[in-house]
Image: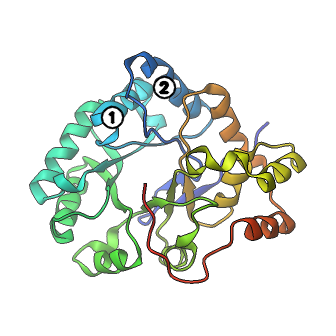
Amino acid sequence: MQDAIPTTSLAGGMSVPVLGQGTWHMGERKASAAEEAKCLRHGLDLGMTLIDTAEMYADGGAERIVAEAVKGRRSDAFIVSKVLPTNASRDGTIKACEASLKRLGTDHIDLYLLHWRGRYPLTDTVEAFEALRQSGKIGAWGVSNFDSDDMEELLAVPDGGKVAANQVLYNLARRGIEYDLLKDSQSRGIPVMAYSPLDEGRLMRHPDLIHIAKAHQATVAQVALAFLIRNPGVIVIPKTAMPERVRENRATVEVELTADDIAILDRAFPPPARKMPLEMI
C-alpha cells in the first residue's frame, strides 16, 4: 500500500496535498482532450486531488478539460484557477471568475489566483477576490509570480493578509526563491506552489539526478519532485497526459532523499548566494 500524500495548510486553514496536477498545455488539441481528462481522473483516484489550471491555458481549453475530469465527482477535487492581469480590475476579476466557473462546470473555485502583476491596483483585485469569496464563488484567493517585494506590497493593502498561496517557478535548476521568498512565505504560513517543477523536462538527463534515482530505484522525476516537497509548505503541480507518468508522480512520496543526496544536488544545483530576480516562464 502506498504512503499517503502529505498535506499542507493554506493560509486560512484549508488542507491540500503537496503533490497535485498541472494542466498547462492541456486543451490545446481536440484529439488529446479525452486522454488528458482521463489522466486527471486517474490522478484524482490516486489522491492527487489538487488540480491547477487558468483561464489563459489554451484560452480556457484547459479549464474545459478539468470540467470533464471532475464531472460527477466535483467534491473529490480541489480546483485552482487564475485570472489574467489584463482582467484583474474589480469588475473584470468577477467577470473572469464567472467565465471560468462556466467553463469548469462548477459553482465554486477552491483557490483563485492573480496570474501575475499587471496594471490594475492590487487593492482593486483584492476587493474583487474578497467579494467572490464572500459570495461563495471562490473558497480562497492567492497570487502567482509574486516576488518578495510584491508580497510585501500585497500584505500592506486592506485584506491583503488573506492571501492563501503564491504560485511561482521553482525547481532544482531555478532555486532563486530559496534566498528570501521561500523563507518569508514559510514564516508567514503562506504555501508556495511550484510550477514547472521538472523544468519542462530539462532535468531528466542530468547525470547526478540519474545516479541518485538509480540508488533509490526511483526515476529522475521522482527525485526532482521529492527534493521540492521535502521543504515545508511547498506544493508541486507536475503536468502529464500519460497514465504511467501519473502513477510515477504519485510514487514520489515513497522517495526519501538522504543528507548525502541533498549535498550532491546542492553541488550540482547550487542554492542562491544572493537575491535574484524572480524567474518566470
Dividing the picture into quarters, in which one does residue 249 lie? top right
Q: Position of residue 180 (x, y in %)?
A: 52, 80
Q: Which residue is mark 1?
A: 58
Residue visible at 49% across and 75% down in the picture: 181
Residue visible at 66% across and 48% down in the picture: 5
Q: Which quarter shows the N terminus?
A: top right
Residue 228 is at least partly visible in this image: yes
Compared across the picture, whether 262 is left or right of 51 comes to right
Q: Position of residue 119 (x, y in %)?
A: 17, 65
Which one is nearer the viewer's eye here, 45 or 259? 259
- Circle 1 — which element? helix
Which one is nearer the viewer's eye here, 61 or 69? 61
Q: Select label 2 or label 1 by which is in front.
A: 1
Q: Which residue is mark 2?
A: 36
Residue 106 is at least partly visible in this image: no
Q: Which mark is residue 67?
A: none
- Circle 2 — which element? helix
Q: Position of residue 79 (x, y in %)?
A: 40, 43
Residue 245 versus residue 129 in the image, above or below? above
Q: Which one is earlier in the sequence, the residue at label 2 or at label 1?
A: 2
Compared across the picture, whether 119 is left or right of 1 comes to left
Q: Position of residue 148 (x, y in %)?
A: 41, 77
Task: Calculate the distance from the C-alpha at mark 2 to the C-alpha at mark 1.
Answer: 13 Å
| Mark 1 crowdedness (10 Å alpha carbons): few <14, some 14-19, many ≥20 | some
Type of amino acid under label 2 = Glu
Type of amino acid under label 1 = Ala
Residue 73 versus residue 130 in the image, above or below? above
Residue visible at 23% across and 78% down in the picture: 157
